[in-house]
Image: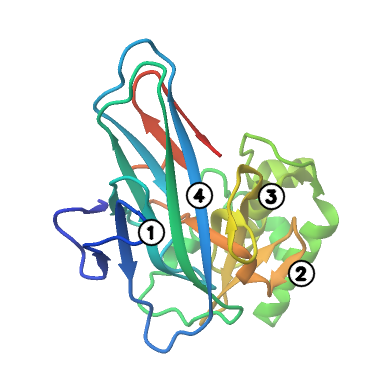
Amino acid sequence: MWRIVGVILLSWVCPLASPADGLATEFSFDPPRGVTGRERHIRFSFTLTNERNTPATNGSFWVHAPVRRSSSQHCLRIGTSRPAELIQDEAGNNILRFPIDLLPPYGAEVIVIKADLLMNEHMDPVEGEAIQPYLDPEAKIQSNHEDIMVQASRFLSELPQETVTNVYTWIKKNVQDVGFTSRDFGALWALRHRKGDCTEMADLFVAFCRAVGVPARIIDGYMCTGNTIARVSDYHNWAEYYDGEFWHVVDPQQGVFINGGSGYVATRISLPGAKSPLEAWRRFHVEADGVKAEMN
């Protein structure tokens, strides 16, 4: 099950007693020793609106915050404009829960999340991470389906790096980018229809890799460079594959292969079979009758 960071804290998470910059809650994380990179500051904001003529009480707003670690990202701090609990799910994702104690009739509240990240282009070695789950099929990543296995076998090379390059190149040339769609159709659909958005392209890349024994995974987050305010239009899905030592960013839709990871802020790593309070929602979810949540 996931672990809640509140009154009882995990050893590696430390909420500061006196949050800076007017923040109500702040959590700090220690990066692995010797890790270097460029620090970046990211801001997210959401508006909660009570659409009913009665107060909203005893609810919660859940949202994915930047992950503690991806292939090119280390999260140093997360701060919030109102009190929150930090929860780490089984995949290691950072999830914030904001209690909705009282939201007046037709009232609205803006929640601001700030994150300080350490970004680099050079991927950190994987230590103590389970890799086997990233070879397993999933509902939308049908790596054990005959159609995907047959096509994936055509990409095989004596060199694993060349195999992955063949996968990326084929998707880039043969799968049409149709722009954003709200529904995730999955890898098999993308193979059969030869089209999709960033999600289908990433799903298909991961499915092909797993079908030939290369660990790969889906990442959710935002495409943004420098210090910035992340917006709805920045939301994106991409892939990472594991070469036996490092995870590498691959994004067929954007034409990114291996390099370019510092332009991606990861907020969710998809781990097959992992339990999470947000497992049915990729970005955020509100649990309160009559309350709507929107990213600003």
The residue nearer to you, when weighing 184 against 144, is 184
Residue displayed at 73% across by 66% down = 256
Query: SS at mark 4?
Result: strand
Comparing labels 1 and 4, the label whose residue is closer to the camera: 1
State left or right for residue 250 relative to residue 244: right
Q: How far apart are marks 3 and 4 (CA)?
A: 21 Å
Mark number for residue 166? 2
Residue placed under numbered mark 1 in the picture = 21
Q: How far apart are marks 1 and 2 (CA)?
A: 48 Å
Residue 172, percent across and down?
80, 59
Q: Which amino acid does label 2 sit on?
A: Asn
State left or right for residue 244 relative to residue 50: right
Q: N-terminal of the two: label 3 or label 2?
A: 2
Q: N-terminal of the two: label 1 or label 4?
A: 1
Question: Would residue 155 be seen by someone viewing this image from the given angle?
Answer: no
Query: SS at mark 1?
Result: loop
Q: Which amino acid does label 1 sit on?
A: Asp
Q: N-terminal of the two: label 1 or label 2?
A: 1
